[in-house]
Image (spheres, rainbow, N blue to C red):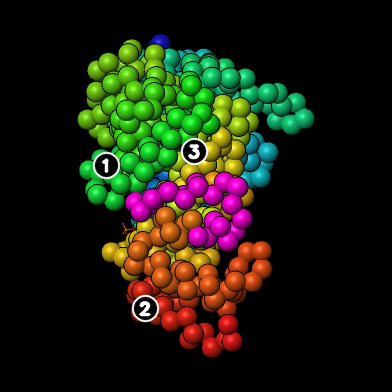
């Protein structure tokens, strides 16, 4: 492809100068993969200069999911983010959100693009996106993620493209770009297998909207993964054991079913364990993120095909993929997050979802997003898209956090993201609680006995025994006693079940 001479080449600073205070910007990026880098960093510098001159400068930031430091980090440090959606995982932005300086509203990732198209987020003035190539007539080859970029480009008044030569133009063919029509004209999403392609290998935009190209050569700001520790290895083994048994007794069909796995160290270890289990056949992935362990498993033939919306790899793994790009293009593809996470497709393909909880209660309600009921961690991400529609929905987490001072299994979650109606299986380093066909009391016993840390089992049993009445045995007075103990003494093990002063 030849780059159009009609599209002006700008420096990042010149591109940032086009952005006005109060604008809403749709940035490419789903995790740090494929995120815009040079322009957001220049916008942060512009914001600081404006603030020094005594002028207000803040923008609305919409992305696919989390991004890298030069986007969320730099903009948050410059106090330049008026509002933000959906998922984020940056410590500076998190601080700004929890301090009330940035308005954040969370959203299921599959719904972000349609909410943008429906106008629910207001007008989008700019799409700032990363690509590896663009043609004069507006055919764009994206890089390591698709996310919500197609929608941002279609809705935005103006488009700025970072052409990043860190990524080869030969990435063309990795992407499958498709945007559904909106109701009442929407049609079925015709993905009937993980490898089905329903769109175009390029993103087609109106070239007259492209106001500038910024040339960069910047790697994705993805961190590496921690080597699995004893806890994550045990969680991984427990998940693999559970799935191997479901397969053995015939509840999972002989072809196996596609796996969705969240992002992070636990998810990486879980996938590794599933891939290596001798009784689990080679399988496919229909997920949102392709992480390091997927690449290893593709090479070993344990994963036959992986569909996702981002290639979130450590730098050495990405280099490996680029060295054998044609091999990997036959075995994976990247779709918009609206399709990678689409409830219709998740239900049709029979996806086994595996996501991570911050805390979960003895009845199977899951908190994925908030610490002690109030402080945002990252966001719901795609966990709800998959959990609610999965063939089997699994939640994993270590049985304790903060060196044992917090039990992740509590009487009642302090914030609710996934309800007991969507959560079927809970797995910790301690074991497996299969919640299917169990009433709330039976669920509580299974979770306490199989998943809670031994240090907390007695307390949780004590709670359950003291609140025997009702279909869901619960005491509104005592349910947060463990959280209260942590807030008061920094350790849930100091819980005092009687100091709430009530008769129960
Ligand atoms: O904090 O590092 O300061 O100690 O939470 O916990 O155990 O390192 O696990 O990195 O996998 O993150 C749920 C946040 C887990 C993530 C969550 C503290 C703990 C540590 C991180 P420290 P770990 P992970 C795919 C699907 C929601 C979205 C989702 C997440 C930090 O997986 O954001 O699933 N999920 N999306 O100490 C207080 C507790 C705690 C706690 C853990 N009960 N109380 N702190 N921590 N449990 C992603 C996308 O959609 C893109």
Residue at position x 48%, y 20% in the image: 255
Q: Secondary structure at mark 1?
A: loop
* Nearest the eye: 68 or 37: 68
**Rendering coords of residue 329 (x, y %):** 38, 16
Q: Residues within 10 Å of mark 1 (few under 14, many from 20)?
A: some
x and y, in percent, of residue 141 in the image:
43, 20
Asked whether residue 476 is drawn in magenta, I would say: no
Q: CA distance from mark 1 to mark 3?
A: 21 Å
Secondary structure category for the residue under label 3: strand
Which is more N-terminal, label 3 or label 1?
Answer: 1
**Looking at the image, is mark 3 or mark 2 earlier in the sequence?**
3
Please name the residue that numbered disc 3 is placed on.
353
Front residue of 140 and 147: 147
**Which of the two residues, 167 or 499, is positioned nearer the viewer here?**
499
Question: Badge 2 local density, few (<14 within 10 Å), some, or many (20+)?
Answer: some
Q: Is residue 314 above or below residue 41?
A: above
Of residue 54 and residue 478, the one placed in the foreground of this image is 478
Indicate which disc residue 494 carries: 2
Instruction: Please name the residue that numbered disc 1 is placed on.
Output: 225
- The Cα–Cα distance between marks 3 and 2, rounded to whole angstroms, is 35 Å
Quadrant of the rendering where the N terminus is positioned: top left
The residue lying at 25 percent from left, 29 percent from top is 317
Name the side, left or right, on which 173 lies relative to 391: left
Q: Residue at x 52, y 60 (%)?
A: 444
Q: Which residues are magenta?
A: 425-445
In the image, residue 444 lies in the stretch drawn in magenta = yes
Q: Judge whether 333 appears above or below 316 on screen.
A: above
The answer to whether residue 438 is seen in the rendering is: yes
């Amino acid at each position: 492809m030849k780059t159009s001479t009609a599209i002006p080449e700008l420096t990042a600073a010149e591109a940032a100068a086009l952005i006005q205070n109060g604008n809403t910007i749709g940035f490419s990026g789903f995790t740090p993969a494929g995120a815009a880098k040079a322009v957001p960093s220049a916008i942060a510098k512009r914001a600081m200069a404006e603030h020094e001159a005594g002028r207000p400068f803040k923008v609305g930031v919409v992305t696919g999911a989390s991004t890298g430091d030069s986007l969320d980090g730099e903009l948050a440090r410059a106090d330049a983010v008026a509002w933000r959606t959906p998922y984020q995982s940056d410590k500076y932005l998190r601080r700004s959100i929890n301090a009330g300086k940035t308005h954040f509203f969370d959203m299921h990732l599959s719904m972000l693009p349609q909410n943008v198209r429906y106008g629910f987020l207001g007008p989008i003035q700019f799409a700032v996106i990363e690509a590896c190539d663009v043609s004069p007539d507006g055919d764009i080859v994206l890089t390591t993620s698709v996310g919500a970029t197609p929608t941002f480009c279609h809705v935005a008044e103006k488009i700025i493209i970072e052409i990043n030569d860190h990524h080869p133009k030969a990435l063309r063919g990795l992407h499958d770009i498709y945007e559904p029509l909106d109701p009442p004209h929407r049609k079925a999403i015709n993905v009937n297998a993980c490898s089905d392609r329903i769109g175009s290998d390029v993103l087609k935009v109106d070239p007259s909207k492209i106001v500038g190209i910024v040339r960069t050569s910047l790697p994705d700001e993805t961190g590496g993964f921690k080597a699995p520790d004893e806890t994550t290895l045990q969680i991984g083994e427990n998940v693999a054991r559970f799935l191997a048994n479901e397969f053995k007794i015939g509840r999972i069909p002989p072809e196996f079913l596609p796996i969705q796995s969240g992002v992070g160290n636990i998810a990486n270890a879980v996938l590794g364990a599933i891939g290596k289990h001798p009784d689990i056949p080679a399988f496919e992935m229909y997920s949102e993120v392709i992480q390091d362990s997927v690449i290893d498993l593709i090479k070993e033939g344990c994963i036959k095909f992986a569909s996702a919306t981002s290639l979130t790899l450590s730098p050495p793994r990405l280099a490996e993929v680029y060295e054998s790009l044609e091999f990997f293009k036959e075995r994976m593809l990247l779709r918009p997050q609206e399709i990678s996470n689409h409830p219709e497709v998740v239900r049709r393909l029979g996806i086994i979802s595996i996501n991570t909880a911050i805390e979960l209660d003895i009845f199977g309600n899951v908190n994925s997003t908030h610490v002690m009921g109030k402080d945002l961690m990252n966001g719901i991400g795609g966990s709800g898209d998959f959990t609610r529609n999965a063939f089997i929905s699994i939640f994993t987490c270590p049985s304790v956090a903060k060196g044992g001072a917090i039990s992740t299994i509590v009487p009642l979650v302090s914030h609710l993201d996934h309800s007991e109606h969507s959560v079927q299986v809970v797995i910790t380093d301690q074991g497996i609680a299969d919640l299917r066909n169990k009433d709330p009391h039976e669920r509580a016993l299974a979770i306490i006995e199989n998943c809670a840390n031994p240090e907390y089992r007695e307390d949780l049993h004590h709670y359950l025994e003291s609140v025997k009445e009702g279909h869901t045995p619960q005491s509104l007075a005592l349910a947060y006693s463990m959280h209260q103990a942590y807030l008061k003494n920094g350790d849930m093990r100091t819980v005092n079940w009687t100091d709430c002063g009530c008769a129960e």
